[in-house]
Amino acid sequence: SGRWARAMAILREFEENCGTPIGKLRQVADAMAVEMHAGLASEGGTYISILILAFHIAVVSKSPGQEENGLFYALDLGGTNFRVIRVLLGGKDGGVVKQEFEEVSIPPHLMTGSSDALFGFIATALANFVATESEGLHPSPGRQRELGFTFSFPVRQTSIASGNLIKWTKGFLIDDVVGQDVVGELTKAMERIGLDMRVSALVNDTIGTLAGGRYHNPDVIAAVILGTGTNAAYVERAQAIPKWHGLLPKSGEMVINMEWGNFRSSHLPLTEYDQDLDVESLNPGEQIFEKIISGMYLGEIVRRVLLKMAEEAAFFGDIVPPKLKIPFILRTPHMSAMHHDESSDLRVVGSKLKDILEIPHTSLKMRKAIVELCDIVATRGARLSAAGIVGIIKKLGRDTVKDGEKQKSVIAMDGGLYEHYSKFSTCMESTLKELLGEEVSDNIAVEQSNDGSGIGAALLAASHSQYL
Ligand code: ADP
Ligand code: MG
């Protein structure tokens, strides 16, 4: 019928505009490497931030050893959930003896409320977790509890344990925190409820993952997060950072937080749906790369295309399903469940449409089109993530094999999108191979880090302990 043809025309046009042929991906990778060079040379003039982490030498120098032992806490605030973690360090060769954690979801109203409300909630959850310390998991007598704070929003670090928030991302918007020291805000909130704890390290998830990754494997050169948002950090030769005029670390290496979520380039395949999503977001004009590849947004892009198909081609019948008009109602985990539906009648797709969008009846043909839509959105995100990683590998000159050299490069990867959306991660990894070629790919590994960001923060807290 005419309606079906119109709906398919919308889908095909979207597919066309999302195209990521290999040539385009190479342009994106090159553009990322160019941005990195520019960001290392001078302040400003780039979309990505290139934040030099001069205080995080422990990440690149020695791994924490036996002198760091005892009980340490970490707090991981990255998006919709936050985790409180406690680790016992100090096995025979240093290392993690025991770890415990709890995950708490952040009530949405706190994401756009006040600083006191957000940090008060976090401090209370932390205090409740501290109260569950069991036998053998207490700090040594007379010692204050110490915490590594993983705060995964752009921060200008002013010391190992302080830093000012540059801007919120990922659906947070709390004006009275912008420009403030987030450790100060947390510390005040802890004091208000009488929780005696010292924040000894402030990191973000990429740095935590990098620290945790290198602790286990010295070949780790970069960390990438694909979760609610996206970001990357890597280890750079100090000599390759013209804008750095401070002391040079003994190792000759420094840690760089790229804030690549804010990357953009004329080579990115952006569609009308992406433009609308951006304009209607809490941070218009910002985080364009993040808005086409990360978990917070993929499901929302699918919803926007479906809405257009409903409105302009009556895809779901004469009435546009009212729920389909609600922003962010279709989350990426729902999308992923539909995309992975292996049943012959696509019954998972049918039940998601029914449960979430209150669309009771859908034909198999419609369900197939929806799976295809999920595939288009996930494929674009996964292939662009791979291009970003290739940008880093190029910047480090590891995109070619020199004289048959077999130097390993490991990318530590973390985040719920990568971990749970297997069609996404599979596509990302095959695209990496496609871009790098077989010979180079053999020397490059992507390793899923198991809560590197939390453990890494605890390790950094330990290596900056006041008792060392
Ligand atoms: P954060 O990035 O907030 O620190 P995570 O790394 O745990 O947290 O990532 C959570 C994000 O991962 C969610 O916002 C969601 O987009 C994505 N995600 C979680 N589960 C799934 C899933 N089953 N399929 C696809 N994406 C998922
Ligand atoms: Mg996280």
Image (cartoon, rainbow, N blue to C red):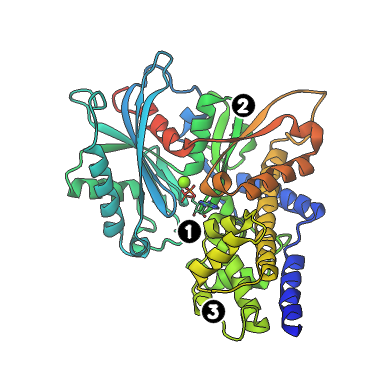
Query: Which quarter of the figure has residue 379?
Result: bottom right
The image shows residue 448, relative to residue 377, as above or below, that is: above
Q: Nearer the viewer, residue 357 or 104?
A: 357
SS state under label 1 = loop
Residues at marks 2 and 1, CA–CA distance in whole angstroms: 31 Å
Callout count: 3
Give the mark nearest the N terminus, 2 or 1.
1
Q: Please state which amino acid type lies under the numbered disc 3.
A: Pro
Quadrant assignment for the C terminus: top left
Q: Is residue 323 left or right of residue 105?
A: right
Which residue is the site of mark 2? 219
Identify which residue is drawn at 65% across, 49% down: 423
SS state under label 3 = loop
Which residue is the site of mark 1? 170
Identify which residue is drawn at 52% across, 50% down: 227
Give the mark nearest the N terminus, 1 or 3.
1
Q: Which mark is residue 223?
A: none
Residues at marks 1 and 3, CA–CA distance in whole angstroms: 27 Å
Q: Nearer the viewer, residue 283 or 348?
A: 348
Task: Determine the residue located farthest toward the top in the rendered image.
Answer: 92
* Mark 3 surroundings: few (<14), some (14-19) or many (≥20) residues within 10 A: some
Q: Which mark is residue 321?
A: 3
Quadrant assignment for the N terminus: bottom right
